[in-house]
Amino acid sequence: MAVGVRTQDLRKIYNAAPPLGAAGGFMARADAKGAKQPKAQIPALDGLSLEIHPGEIFGLLGPNGAGKSTTVGVLTTRVRPTSGQAWIGDHDVWKEQAHVKHLIGVVPQRPNLDFSLTAREILVFHGAYFGIGSKQRNERADGLLEKFKLTERGNQMVRGFSGGMMQRLSIARAMMHDPQVLFLDEPSAGLDPQTRILLWEIIREYHQAGKTILLTTHYMEEADSLCQRLAIVDHGHMIAVGTPAQLKASIPGGFLLRLRFGRLTPELLQRLQALAGVREVRALDTTSKGTLESAGENAGKSAAEHAGVDVYADRGGSLIPEIANLAATAGAELSDVHISEPSLENLFLHHTGRSLRD
Amino acid sequence: MNWKTFFAMLARDAHVARRNAIQLLLQTFLQPLLFVFIFGRVMVGSGYMPAAYKSLLLPGIIAISMTFTGIWAVAMPLIAEFQWTREIEDRLLAPISVGWIAIEKVIAGMLQALVAGLVVIPLAWLVLRPGVQISIDSPLTFAVIILLVAGFSSCGGLALGCSINQQHIGLMFSLVMTPMIFFGCTYYPWSALKTFPILQKLVLINPLVYASEGMRATLVPQFPHLSIAAVIIALLFFDGLLLVVGLRQFENKSVT
């Protein structure tokens, strides 16, 4: 029977730099009163509640440092939450650790393979740790080596493996004890496109066997094509949750036109807003967190020399002539245009004012 | 408690030890055997040392070999496994509680220390003979003492391995290991320090003193040594202390 995953109001504050692989979070601002300088505390999760249904492929999407790895860490007994609770099925992760570890398979962001063993031994010993009988664990190890195209290297020490091979072996190891819930932390980071496709196939196949899969990614297309539901996280908060289609539909208009003008006047903004099909207009140098820095840099130059505007609209390219006309009338040269179709990237940008790649 | 997992981990450690056997043997025995050869054969043979020194030296050599095998066997892999790859998670994700993983490491280290002790006795005897007079009058006491020595070295390895980083291994040798050997009453009995009364009291914080003196008390009782009761009490204390410290450090370092 498929097993779900749940978290309730998870918080995690690192007192020192977070461990590698869960690196991220953002620096807390110093106490405003400044009476006592608090120790540098790095909040990575700030009240995250998730519900992952049994048997679904669920994606956690967010930029580096959003809290994705920390969430996976808490759910896999590796990171102790500062407060809040986490369950795998009916089992409290932090009260029934040994039981929970039976149910989960973990593919970490960095391969944490046993470097003293060969690839095959890693799988066989992993099977032994989980109490699988000798015959069965040997058969299973051979099957997984075959599946992940590692048979030829099976008897070699993993120290000399390439990053992609280590990643494949990590996934094979996680599947070795046939866990009910598979966690994959940035599974396709560093994989070549061919291996990525192999990985996606394997994930889909595993899911069809009735397993629950939680993966973190900052690749849009991965989240889009693989996940049944997604949560978008940033700064340890959940920003949005739903199916990829639902999430994309929640962006006003769907199309995003990123424009740059020589200069920007309130009048121009009003006229942009009035164009047919335009849903929302955002001037970046005043409203967006993500561009504060560049606005600051430009402050010395003529005011808002590279003023950017995000326009959310129902249509894309067909708006450009009208926008160019408006700009010419207002005496503001249109210096750059970027049109993107409805995507999760746009969704992220819409909610956070930042690009996923920032 | 999941015994299958526990024994699978022990099997893994045995497998790795077998694979590295030659390296382990050289690393464990070369230095003490060279020491035995120079001091036991060359110095005694040329008359700079009395012949009785051979018998006095052997228990100290056993104590050193066991202690450093135990520390090394636990600390060095742990230091590597806690590095950025976090290899340790390969074990931490096994269905067993974190504390038991540390205890498995301690048991594996103890077994290696015991093997080292049992191998170094005939080896050193071969190098030193003739003229070594050792006797095991009370096998039970001897067994208790070597178990306690294996225990403190292995627990010490756990505490050290969870407390220092890879870049500090050199420092660990010069600040911990070297003083421990030289002030460990390994090459001389504790009573030989009586002309340095302050030092004689200070070295009592070094568990290797009790290991060496315990070996001396059971193997060569004809030489001066601390009482067996004092040795056992002190070793029990260090075993317990280092185990508690080691377990705490391990749990702190395993879960962030």
Image: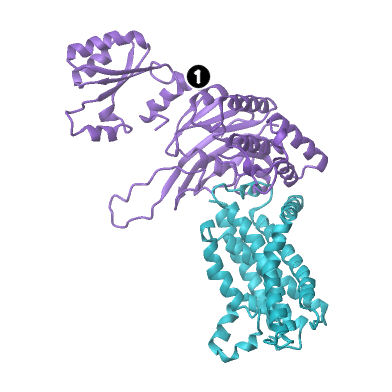
Chain colours: A purple, B cyan
Residue B154 visible in this rendered orientation of the protein: no
* Image quadrant where residue B102 sits: bottom right
User: Between residues A175 and B169, which one lies in front from this camera angle?
Assistant: B169
x and y percent of residue A167 in the render? Answer: 61, 36
Give me the residue at 23% from left, 19% from top: A269
x and y percent of residue A73 in the render? Answer: 55, 43
- Specify few, some or many for label 1: CA neighbours under 10 Å numbering under 14, 14-19, or 20 or more: some
Give me the residue at 73% from left, 79% from top: B41
Task: From the viewer's perspective, tell me whether residue A37 is left or right of residue B238.
Answer: left
Screen quadrant of the C terminus of chain A: top left
x and y percent of residue B108 in the render? Answer: 72, 60
Give me the residue at 67% from left, 63% from top: B27
Residue A317 visible in this rendered orientation of the protein: yes
Above or below residue A44? Residue B128 is below
Screen quadrant of the N terminus of chain A: top right
Q: Chain of mark 1?
A: A
User: Between residues B125 and A101, which one lies in front from this camera angle?
Assistant: B125
The residue lying furthest to the bottom in this view is B195
* Image quadrant where residue A53 sits: top right
Above or below residue B46? Residue B108 is above
Q: For mark 1, what is the residue?
A: A245
Helix, strand or loop at disc 1?
helix
The residue lying furthest to the front in this view is B46
Task: From the viewer's perspective, tell me whether residue A307 is left or right of residue B131.
Answer: left
How many numbered marks, from 0 up?
Answer: 1
x and y percent of residue A213 in the render? Answer: 61, 31
User: Between residues B87 and B5, which one lies in front from this camera angle?
Assistant: B87
Amino acid type, callout 1: Ala
User: Between residues A30 and B191, which one lies in front from this camera angle?
Assistant: B191
